Structures are given as structure tokens and as C-alpha cells.
Image (cartoon, rainbow, N blue to C red):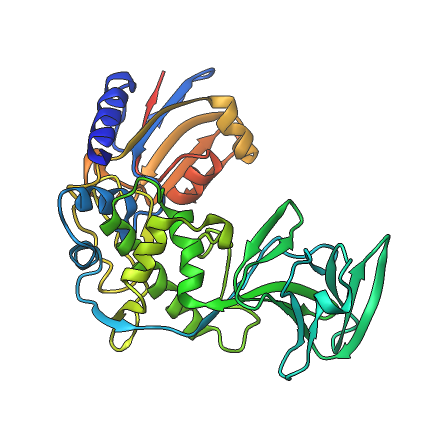
């Protein structure tokens, strides 16, 4: 299913895309020109392609074969324990706020002191932790306004006795397993950190990264191992920091207990504890939505540039006026030329561009291919251009 969709999409786009008009990697841009851009891949292209993994799984490859292709030279190891996730929208005006439910407790961090919140205030409509300076915390409940239950020295956290806790976020709400802790991030400020067992964390990552309802099971298992390895590596590099990862795509997307799905839960359980390693440490298992047919070389020997026959993802055409591009780089004035340099020479159209140079009547700007793609909301820096 995944391969057929990619092939059909590529065929349709190839039939509709405007042909490129280029001279030595550059395009002259006359006044009032139309610039049409199309390309390959989605994302940075390093490590495992999620599209390629899905197609390999449909062809009968198991998750170890998939990972062996995308991370050649790595070994297998194990990683368990807990991870600390900064919930990026998990505080409201410096407060960690949760919904009441049976079994909810508050705990003073580093001690055995626990308050059963249902017993303490059975009719409470909400609970929150507020900072009192950098060295104390206030536990409050809501009943026609907020009221103080306890003020303690040190930090506080909420726990659910094995059940998810519903967190009030800046925009909406979400449920999380493990513990929600109010953690100092800078003088006078707190952030919400979810401390959760590794594989419980992955139950909220895998379905956030792939479509768990229809992605092949072996591809989901490959995703689980890649995500676990990545988390184990990040955890090992941040022992003195307030968190190991955050919940955004800056690390890997994490949606908590609300995202859990039977097929992705199965993938996490089937690979329990498994990670890829290199030289005895967790491997830097970068992954991308699609590489478009070639992986991009990373900074590690197990992240080579190599052809990927299972990923033929394309995008475009996307059309801009010259004034739309000028609006992103107004310092160049009237755009009259675009040049792409430092291509990696892999795949069609010489593949990904290292730099894009925009020359106008008032000046010249050179940016990375990734910055250019990001500014114009393109899916990758593997692109070609036609000017009309």
C-alpha cells in the first residue's frame, strides 16, 4: 500500500511539474517572474527514512533488517530506566496544574512524604503546584478559587499510582503516565517535566511519529528501536540538566498517553529494551520522514549517504512570485538571480543543495539549503527550480 501510493504520487507530480530551466546551477529571474520549485524527500534525510522503512516492511523485511540498512555498523544493546521529558506547553503561568481523580497523590521530591489528594480534598476541581521562590513549593486545590493545602521546602510532583494524569496545558490538555514534576529552569521560573519509564515514553512517541493504525508492524518496531536508541543517547548527555528531551520534533515528537495505540504498543513491547549501539554507547539514530531516494550523510560513520531504492517520495510543484521570495530577504532588493551550490551529487537534479544564493539589485544573500527550504515551507533542500 505504501509503495503504490508513493509511486502514484510521484507519477502525478512528474506529469504536472514545470520543467527546470537552469544554467550551471543558476537561474536568472526577470521582473514579475514566476518561480516553480519541486523536489524529493521530506526532512533532513539522515538516518532511517520512515517511508523507506514502511516500504521495506511491506516487502517482507523485519525490523532488524530495516535498521541494519539505515544504520550499518551498529551493534545491539539494551536501555531501560526512566527518561525526563519537558512538556513544552505544560505550565500555566509558572504553575503545574492537573485534573483531580481517584489515586492522585502529591509527593515531596527526594522524600517519602506523600499526600493522598482525594482524601485531603475529595471535592477539589483541580490541583496545582506553584513555586515559592527557588527553594519551596505551594500545593493548592481549586474550589471557587484556589486555596493552599501545603507549603513545603523543596520540589513537588504529582503521581497517579500507575494511571495517567491529566495535565492542563497552555492550549488544551493531555494525559501522561509516570510523574509530573515542577522543576526550576531558571531563577524564579518552573517547567513541567514528565518522568516516565523508557518504554512507557515510547508508547507516546511511536504513534506520534508514524501512522500506527496502518503502518506495517515491522516498520513500527524499527521506529521503536530508533526512538529508544535516540532517547537513551540524549539521556546520557544531559545528567546535570533539568530534562533529557522535550516533546517536540526538535528531539522526537511525544504526545503522552492520549496517543497510545494497540499496534504501536505491540511494537514497543516486542522490542522491549532494545537499542542500537556504537562503540559501546547508544547510537545517534537520526530518522526522517523521507529521504527521497538517497540518505544524507550524518556526522557518524553509521550514517552514510547511500541510495535508498525503497523511498521515491517527491513533492511539488510549489509556485512563488519573485516578490514573495523577496519578502523573505528584503535586503537583496529586486531579485534577479538564484544559484544553488554545494549539491551532494546524489540522485536526480544533483540532489540536495548545500547553499542557495539570492542576488538582487541591492545585494546578495547566501543561506543554507535547509534555511531556504524552511523559509519557504518546502519539504526538503533537495529541489530544482524553473523560472517563467
The image position of residue 119, as x and y in percent, is 73, 68
Question: Which one is nearer the viewer's eye here, 365 or 316?
Answer: 316
The image position of residue 120, as x and y in percent, is 76, 69
Q: Quadrant of the C terminus?
A: top left
**Left or right of 182 on screen, residue 5:** left
The image position of residue 6, as x and y in percent, is 24, 31
Residue visible at 49% across and 28% down? 325
Question: Which one is nearer the viewer's eye here, 377 or 288?
Answer: 288
Q: Is residue 126 visible?
A: yes
Residue visible at 56% across and 54% down? 175
Image: 117 above or below 318:
below
Image: 124 above or below 80:
above
Image: 114 above or below 21:
below
**Left or right of 214 on screen, residue 349:** left
Residue 202 position by quadrant? bottom left
Residue 11 position by quadrant? top left
Residue 309 position by quadrant? top left
Q: Is residue 94 visible?
A: no
**Left or right of 362 on screen, residue 252:** left
Q: Residue placed farthest to the bottom in the image?
A: 111
Q: Quadrant of the N terminus?
A: top left
Image: 59 above or below 65:
above
Q: Disc count in the image? A: 0
The image position of residue 79, as x and y in percent, is 34, 73
Residue visible at 28% across and 22% down? 13
Question: Which one is nearer the viewer's eye here, 381 or 43?
Answer: 43
**Left or right of 118 on screen, residue 76:** left
Amino acid at each position: 500500500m505504501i509503495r503504490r501510493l508513493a509511486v502514484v504520487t510521484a507519477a502525478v507530480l512528474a506529469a504536472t511539474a514545470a520543467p527546470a530551466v537552469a544554467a550551471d546551477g543558476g537561474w536568472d529571474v526577470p521582473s514579475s517572474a514566476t518561480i516553480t520549485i519541486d523536489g524529493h524527500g521530506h526532512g533532513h534525510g539522515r538516518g532511517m527514512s520512515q517511508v523507506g522503512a514502511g516500504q521495506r516492511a511491506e516487502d517482507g523485511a523485519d525490523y532488524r533488517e530495516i535498521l541494519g540498512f539505515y544504520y550499518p555498523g551498529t551493534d545491539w544493546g539494551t536501555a531501560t530506566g526512566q527518561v525526563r521529558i519537558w512538556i513544552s506547553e505544560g505550565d500555566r503561568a509558572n504553575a503545574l496544574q492537573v485534573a483531580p481523580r481517584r489515586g492522585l497523590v502529591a509527593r515531596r521530591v527526594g522524600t517519602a512524604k506523600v499526600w493522598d489528594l482525594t482524601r485531603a480534598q475529595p471535592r477539589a476541581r483541580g490541583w496545582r503546584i506553584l513555586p515559592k521562590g527557588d527553594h519551596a513549593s505551594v500545593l493548592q486545590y481549586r474550589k471557587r478559587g484556589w486555596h493552599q493545602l501545603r507549603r513545603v521546602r523543596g520540589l513537588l510532583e504529582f503521581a497517579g499510582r500507575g494511571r495517567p494524569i491529566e495535565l492542563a496545558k497552555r492550549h488544551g490538555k493531555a494525559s501522561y503516565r509516570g510523574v509530573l514534576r515542577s522543576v526550576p529552569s531558571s531563577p524564579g521560573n518552573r517547567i513541567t517535566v514528565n518522568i516516565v519509564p523508557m518504554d512507557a515514553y515510547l508508547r507516546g512517541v511511536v504513534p506520534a511519529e508514524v501512522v500506527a493504525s496502518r503502518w506495517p508492524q515491522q516498520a513500527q518496531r524499527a521506529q521503536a528501536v530508533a526512538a529508544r536508541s535516540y532517547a537513551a543517547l540524549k539521556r546520557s548527555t544531559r545528567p546535570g540538566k533539568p530534562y533529557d528531551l522535550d516533546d517536540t520534533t526538535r528531539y522526537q515528537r511525544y504526545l503522552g498517553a492520549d496517543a497510545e495505540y494497540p499496534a504501536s504498543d505491540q511494537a514497543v513491547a516486542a522490542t522491549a529494551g532494545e537499542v542500537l549501539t556504537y562503540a559501546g554507547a547508544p547510537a545517534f539514530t537520526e530518522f526522517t520522514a523521507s529521504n527521497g531516494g538517497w540518505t544524507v550523510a550524518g556526522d557518524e560513520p553509521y550514517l552514510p549517504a547511500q541510495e535508498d531504492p525503497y523511498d521515491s517520495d517527491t513533492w511539488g510543484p510549489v509556485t512563488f512570485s519573485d516578490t514573495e521570495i523577496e519578502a523573505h530577504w528584503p535586503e537583496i532588493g529586486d531579485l534577479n538571480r538564484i544559484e544553488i551550490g554545494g549539491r551532494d551529487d546524489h540522485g536526480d537534479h544533483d540532489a540536495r543543495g548545500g547553499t542557495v544564493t539570492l542576488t538582487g539589485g541591492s545585494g546578495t544573500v547566501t543561506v543554507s539549503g535547509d534555511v531556504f527550504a524552511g523559509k519557504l515551507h518546502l519539504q526538503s533542500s533537495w529541489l530544482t527550480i524553473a523560472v517563467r
